[in-house]
Amino acid sequence: MLSYVGRRLVHLIPVLLGMVFIVFMMIRAIPGNPAQVILGQQATAEAVAAMNVKLGLDQPWYIQFFKYLGGVLQGNLGESMRTRLPVADEIWPHLAATMELAFFAILIAIVIGINAGIVSAWFQNSWFDYIAMVLALVGVSMPIFWLGLLGQWTFAIEFSWLPTTGREPVRDPVNAITHLYIIDTLIQGRFDQFFEVVRHLILPGAALATIPMAIIARMTRSSMLEVLRSDYIRTARAKGQKMFWVVYKHAFKNAAIPILTIIGLQMGMLLGGAILTETIFAWPGIGRYIYEAISFRDYPVIQSGILVVAFIFVMINLIVDLLYGLIDSRIKYD
Amino acid sequence: MNESKRILEVKELQTTFFTDSGQIPAVDRISFYLSDSEIVGIVGESGCGKSVTSLSVMGLVPSPPGKITGGEILYNGRDLTRLTDKEMRRIRGNDIAMIFQEPMTSLNPLFTIGNQMIEAIAIHQSEMSKKQSEEKAVQMLKLVGLPRASALMKDYPHQLSGGMRQRVMIAMALVCDPKVLIADEPTTALDVTIQAQILQLMKKLNTDLGTAILLITHDLGVVAEICERVIVMYAGQIIEEAPTSVLFKDPQHPYTQGLIQSVPDMRLKKERLYSIPGNVPKPGTILTGCRFAPRCKFAFDRCISENPELYVTADVHQTRCFLYEERKVKMDGNNTFVDS
Ligand SMILES: Nc1ncnc2c1ncn2[C@@H]1O[C@H](COP(=O)(O)OP(=O)(O)O)[C@@H](O)[C@H]1O
Ligand SMILES: [Mg+2]
């Protein structure tokens, strides 16, 4: 098991290296030059050339690449060309903001999606099943930006129940410690602020959760329907077990592997969806951070930002693969 | 015959499947009983309604599409068809237990043997402590002849052979001391030597624990091995019933005769096994006459137009065939049993 994890991590190295290389080449293909963006349109050619030297952009691309790579291998993600601050320091608050949002969203998606799917399968062809599955069908085909705007318009503007944008009350910002505000407000005992932070999470969280929730519900239902026909389900019922436990213990554990797979995939998609949601809700997350870096041609930020997101993506996949073995002892890692 | 208590008595049971292609009376007004500590066999070709009969008794007919549409199932005089879900759950596993044909798929692959054994105890004997249940489970696994029972508790089903799994199923079914065990083709999926071992085990448990067994099978050889009495089913109906020795000596219904002829006999070393010509009627076909008539070499006009009743042809023998009408001893008019 440990050696399996070790081998998986070793296999990740070429994947991440290849990705760093592709991103490195791609951003250099975008028209525009960081020095020019930093100095402005009026800057003289000499000033731009001097800036290029300062940023190391005058060197051949492979020198730049290996310099960057060498840094990354030592845990140095480079320095923002715009703010001159280390990317590693800058990135965490943004990453924390995205993680908080994505975690909130996936939690909603998992809790509601799985239970809706289970109950739909249990009471197949009931009105609950029909309504849940129609909603799920609508849910998967809903564009995030449209959902986000609809939510903002209804709950923030029309009814003023929830804040339109942002992560915290403007007049009472959270005193950041871990940058995960749910935790920060709790450890400081600021329950009023905690409540505000949750209120800010609801609209973007719901917008982000809708599609994964619908997909998880549908997968759970079909996986459960198949399992509920099994012989061991009949055995459990023949023992006199309550239907609730037959469904939630015996059936669900057997249905869990395809559901887990889809959750892993959806968490990856969520990182992508977060960029759109962050734009609509002015959420100061990693998506917006990278997006802004692109418009400033801030090469190190773009490279390292994408590297960090990719790393999280592959780690999620690894964790999902390890969870399979926890569910089913027949799955061996070797 | 000594009079013992009828623990289970099925009267005029009818179970119907409501499918897109119409109503299928998979079990059509059957009546039988099971006395305390008795082993009774139900035989018949595949599709004749044996499993549906046993699932009806357990209250586990897949619904939809299936439903008990008539009759009574009396357990200790209580009609199970009228019980609520909750009352029926208390009967299942506790008073009437069941084991199934497929030992390979009848245990949950993701839980240990111990977990599934203890679950069965916890459902009906919640007053037992974890440790007591564990001991009881191990004791039961030993009783069904499983070696290294305590280590087995931590094993998953896939680590066991088919025969061992069926032993685990039997142990699990009997762990709450049910009065009745329904075994639906418990040995069909096993190879011959294991099959004999499992049958001997069931016979032994019947003697030691006094559990009455309703043994369902398509194989008369299995019946001959351990059953005291046999019920022969054909197309949803009972067509003959007799004590095992009587049935083998004097099979009356042409279908039963055919079944007995098709039992493999080692001594005769026949080239090919006899098999009854033709097929079981397709489910849902409406038959006015005797259901076996299309395959019967003795069939005459009346057999096509009229379905015979179950004639009591001897004290302990009943047959649904016109050939025995004159031999009937006494009959109570609605196909149910007459007390002997
Ligand atoms: N789930 C079901 N849906 C529809 N019909 C069924 C179902 N289960 C059983 N039946 C009907 O009941 C008949 C008897 O089935 P069964 O009791 O399983 O036969 P067997 O004697 O082989 O155990 C079948 O031929 C079929 O027509
Ligand atoms: Mg069957």
Image (cartoon, coloured by chain):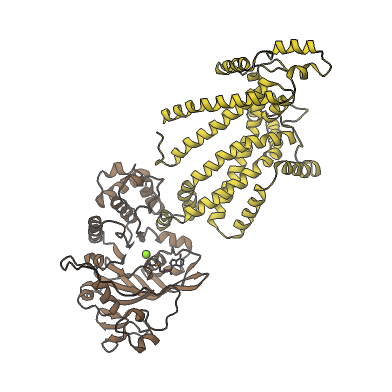
Chain colours: A yellow, B brown
Q: Quadrant of residue B305?
A: bottom left
B127 over A174 or under it: above or below: below
Q: Residue at x 62, y 42 (%)?
A: A108
Q: Quadrant of the C terminus of chain A?
A: top left
Q: Name the residue at the front extreme.
A: A60
Location of residue B326 in the rendering, given as x and y in whole percent from the top left corner: 27, 89
Which quarter of the image is occupied by the N terminus of chain A?
top left
The answer, for residue A176, to whether it is visible in the render is no
Residue ranking furthest to the left: B267
Instruction: Residue A294: tell me if it is visible.
Output: yes
Q: Position of residue A280 (x, y in %)?
A: 74, 36
As displayed, is residue A84 above or below residue B191? above
Residue nearest the viewer, comparing B331 with B280: B280
Taking the spot 51% from the left edge, 37% from the top edge, the residue there is A320
Residue at the spot 69% in from the left edge and 39% down from the top edge = A202
* Residue A289 found in image quarter: top right
- Location of residue B309 with respect to B6 vertically, above or below: below
Q: Quadrant of residue B200?
A: bottom left
x, y percent for residue B153: 33, 44
A30 with respect to B167 (left or right): right
Residue A327 percent coordinates (x, y): 45, 41
